[in-house]
């Protein structure tokens, strides 16, 4: 939940927000007068770790810029954690921009990983500013495109791993860089592939569990085959030793042995 909401006031605060906006991909090329319009419209919120900025399924249309701290973008998933982490977003980056365009329910939740300050810009205020400077829409598309490229890398990696698992090929478990799978905040300095691997850690763990169960099953099958062979062999032996032929042969052998022992005594 949002802890506080306040407008941007005071020269120091205004300058801090101005510097942040000028460093962002969305607003870096905007004229100062447009930046001033934005500063008048944004509100600052402070949150604690675990607070939700955006909740999946909710119908709201604000976009948020991270001022201080980090957040994770998550969707529900069955398992120990109950969530799959799609991304980490930090200072100067935006979350929630899709609802500015389609106004559909939120597709993912955004949760604070640390003490957090965020700037909120409502869809209405965004559209009013964009009327003053239509090029801001282009900057939004560029940023969204970068995010989509990462999502495509994420999906491509997941599909590749799925195909390998279906083929019984778990080589990627050894090939994947373990450092990519370590927990912790993942910033944008890593490659898209490395970041995708990190956020696919839940998938990676699932593949490890599948391989473990498959190996255990293979061992159980081997033991079962051995047991079946042994039972079959015992059954065949019982079948032979229980036959009339074997009984007669055994009797004749016993008689021959008795006659030989008798001849030795004589």
Image (cartoon, grey):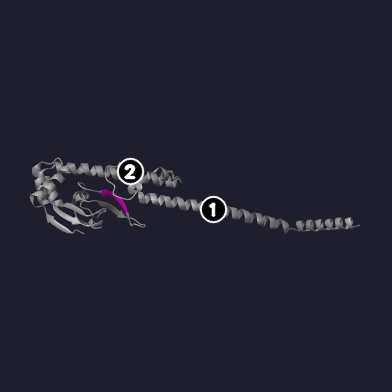
Q: Residue at x 17, y 55 (%)?
A: 45
SS class of the residue under badge 2? helix
Do the numbered discs 1 and 2 sit on residues whose CB atoms are within 8 Å?
no
Work out whether residue 101 or residue 52 is closer to the camera in this orientation and state it: 52
Tag 2 or tag 1, which sits nearer the N-term?
2
User: In which image quadrant can residue 24 be found?
Assistant: top left
Q: Position of residue 251 (x, y in %)?
A: 80, 58
For mark 1, what is the residue?
221
Q: Position of residue 37 (x, y in %)?
A: 9, 47
Q: Position of residue 215 (x, y in %)?
A: 49, 51
Q: Position of 66 compared to 38: left or right? A: right
Q: Nearer the viewer, mark 1 or mark 2?
A: 2
In the image as oriented, which residue stretches furthest toward the front?
12
Q: Is residue 162 visible?
A: yes
Work out whether residue 84 or residue 126 is closer to the camera in this orientation and state it: 84
Asked if residue 245 lies in the magenta stretch, the reply is no
For mark 2, what is the residue?
194
Q: Is 35 above or below relative to 55?
A: above
User: In which image quadrant can residue 140 be found?
Assistant: top left
Find the magenta span and give its range. 84-88
């Amino acid at each position: 939940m949002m802890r506080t909401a306040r407008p941007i006031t005071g020269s120091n605060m205004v300058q801090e927000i101005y510097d942040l906006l000028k460093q962002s991909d969305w607003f870096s090329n905007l004229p100062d007068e447009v930046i001033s319009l934005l500063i008048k419209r944004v509100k600052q919120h402070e949150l604690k770790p675990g607070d939700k900025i955006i909740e999946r399924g909710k119908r709201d249309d604000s976009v948020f810029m991270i001022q201080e701290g980090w957040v994770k973008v998550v969707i529900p998933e069955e398992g120990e954690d109950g969530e799959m982490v799609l991304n980490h977003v930090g200072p100067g980056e935006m979350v929630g921009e899709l609802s500015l365009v389609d106004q559909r329910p939120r597709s993912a939740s955004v949760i604070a990983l640390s003490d957090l300050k965020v700037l909120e810009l409502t869809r209405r205020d965004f559209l009013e500013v964009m009327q003053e400077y239509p090029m801001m829409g282009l900057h939004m598309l560029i940023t969204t495109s970068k995010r989509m490229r990462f999502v495509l890398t994420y999906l491509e990696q997941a599909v590749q791993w799925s195909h390998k698992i279906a083929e019984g090929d778990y080589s990627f478990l050894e090939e994947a860089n373990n450092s990519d799978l370590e927990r912790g905040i993942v910033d944008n300095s890593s490659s898209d592939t490395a970041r995708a691997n990190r956020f696919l850690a839940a998938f990676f763990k699932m593949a490890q569990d599948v391989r473990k169960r498959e190996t255990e099953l293979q061992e159980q099958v081997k033991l079962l085959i051995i047991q079946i062979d042994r039972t079959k062999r015992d059954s065949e032996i019982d079948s032979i030793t229980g036959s009339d032929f074997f009984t007669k042969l055994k009797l004749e052998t016993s008689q021959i042995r008795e006659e030989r022992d008798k001849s030795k005594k004589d």
